[in-house]
Image (cartoon, rainbow, N blue to C red):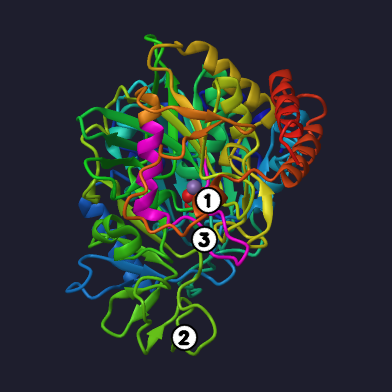
Amino acid sequence: MSSATLSRSTTPSATPAGAAAQPRGAVLAPSLMARSAPSGTDLAVVRWVESIAALTQPEEIVWCNGSPQEWDSLVHLMVTQGTLIQLNPEHRPYSFLARSDPHDVARVEDRTFICSETEEASGPTNNWADPAEMRTTLLGLFAGSMHGRTMYVVPFSMGPVGSPLARLGVQVTDSPYVVASTAIMTRMGSAALAQIEATTKWVPAIHSVGVPLAPGQADVSWPCNTTKYISHFPETREIWSYGSAYGGNALLAKKAFALRIASTMALEEGWLAEHMLILKVTNPRGRAFHVVAAFPSACGKTNLAMLKATVPGWTVETIGDDIAWLHPAADGTLRAINPEAGFFGVAPGTSMSTNATAMETMWGNTIFTNVALRDDGDVWWEGMTKHAPDHLIDWQGKDWSPDAGTPAAHPNSRFTVAARQCPTISDDWEDPRGVVVDAIVFGGRRATNVPLVVEARDWEHGVFLGATVSSEQTAAAEGTVGELRRDPFAMLPFCGYNMADYFAHWLDVGQKLRPGGRMPRIFQVNWFRKDADGSFLWPGFGENSRVLAWILERVDGQRAAIDGPLGLTPTPSGLSLEGLGLRAGDLEKLFEVDRESWLAEVDSTEEFFAGFDGKVPEELNRQLAMLRARLVAVPE
Ligand code: OXD
Ligand code: MN
């Protein structure tokens, strides 16, 4: 079919895809579908669902209402089908284990496409695909792709239902695992659907595992296809995902909507959709601050979001662990909401010592994916306990013992659990107006160069710090673990448009905030700096509260700082280090600026910026030149 037949309005109308595609079987009568839609459903939604059903040919259509009974019947179905294993309720009430296909275990960035009208709009850091060609490919793949399966219609609100900062979406999917996960991760169901009226903008998301079933054909426990496409059409705000049921590839409300499509909405509407956790931190005097922090995937965002402060008198509460939508408000403040309602956290490394709050959060009502199964019917993963159990069933369903030589849980194995179960969830986490942001933090996993903490001199310098984040790659996406890659604002895989325009948008948003008022201050942190012998210099986890305390004392005007080549850093007595047991010289190493390797980093940033064909804002080139000049002035 031609691209012209797809709606280009921002309110999606019926996708006439099915009309042009050659259906393989009987088409469900539209009237049947309209009847099965909840009464009062907006007609555009009904028509769109009809058109997708006509294309994909499901056996049945279920409109999800988000009720507990619906969740019960979905998990019951999946247990019967072998997709979920119920865990021992004595240890983990009402919790389940899913084992994915071994080839469907992480986000597939090389199969993730931004199909903007022009390649320039998508920019050099995204995989661009011609939208018309992509539509032709997708329509071919989706034609009959749900044959023999149920198509679920999953309406959801990102952000508290009815909040002026929330946005709406509807996903159709043939994966009950995706429905059950979306029910945890978003406000899913009737209340969200009821928000959609004729004039409401909503994001249509189409997902199929790409495994149609012939009559009588037995299903597998984790259907997926070796061909995968995670495609985004920023201009029409559509998402089409084919072939995977795993994480961000398939839970389209998360990365695909709340970051890639939302970032393009945010550009148009004057706000920011960010890969950030949100915290409320209260100081010993009872003053509460809100902090947002961007880190690349699997760099401990969930641990920081649930941090137990070790600095006396400070408390930390959780608002979000992965995504923040930041809106400049009329009063000149920046307000944040967590658009999600659950956590899709990396399991390995999570333990009572590294993140007791996460362990408590997942006491029950949790879906685990690709972790190991213990003989007593509970779960286990590397790092959960000091010693591994003598026997486990690994993430691939095979017998495992500590001498197996392979991890029992996949390094990107996950827990999916509702945020409201988190014992440290803040009472303002669902404030429809959002919370006022006091500090913005950028982090990465850097063995060298980047100090424990640096404060930006001003907004422009802060945007430069965000734009120059690089980090060692983790297992959250397919690729070489450990390799250093540029990850500006931790958004490299998640920005739906040209990152040079995104940098400019960050600079513009700064113009809308009121300096001198509660304008957020910007910081960079690095918990992962190593000594020459490869050992970490900073203990991390709860001790990161010492850095947060410094950041917020700066915001509160309580602390002096040293103005150095990279920005503002703590004075020798600025950080609270009591009881930490740092080795002599470690503090200096955490803040050491090695002139030569920093000049090499500046060269590499220059090269990185050059890849944007002159589109990087002048302000950032100026910041780079100023950094070079300051480094050159450092005595050799
Ligand atoms: C995530 C990721 O799952 O960033 O949050 O990959
Ligand atoms: Mn993430």
On whether residue 532 falls in the magenta region, the answer is yes
Does mark 1's beta carbon lie closer than 8 Å to ligand 1? yes
Instruction: Report if residue 576 lies within the magenta region.
Output: no
Counting residues from the start of the chain, the first of labels 1 and 3 encountered is 1
Q: Which of 332 and 136 is in front in this view?
A: 332
Residue 315 location in percent, x, y? 24, 41
Compare marks 2 and 3 and give the one earlier in the sequence.
2
* Amino acid type, residue under disc 1 in the picture: Ser
Q: Mark 1 points at which residue?
A: 297
Q: In the image, what residue occupies the spot 25% across and 50% down?
A: 422
Mark 1: give few (<14), some (14-19) or many (20+) Cα within 10 Å: many
Residue at left 78%, top 31%? 612
Q: Is mark 2 on a helix, strand or loop?
A: loop
**In this orientation, which residue lies closer to the viewer: 377 or 312?**
312
**Disc on res. 266:** none
- Seen from the viewer's position, the closer of residues 456 and 86 is 456
Report which residue position mark 2 lands on. 398
498 up-or-down from 529: above or below: above
The magenta-colored residue range is: 525-552
Q: Where is residue 187 in the image (x, y as percent from the top left)?
A: 32, 40
At 36% across and 51% down in the image, what residue appears? 543
**234 on left or right of 250:** right
State the residue in front, 280 or 41.
280
Q: Please tell me which of labels 1 and 2 falls first in the chain.
A: 1
Instruction: Answer whether residue 207 is visible to the viewer in this image.
Output: no
Name the residue rendered at 51%, 34% in the picture.
Answer: 569
Q: In this view, does 340 lie above or below 241?
A: above
How far is disc 1 from disc 2 in space, using C-alphas?
A: 28 Å
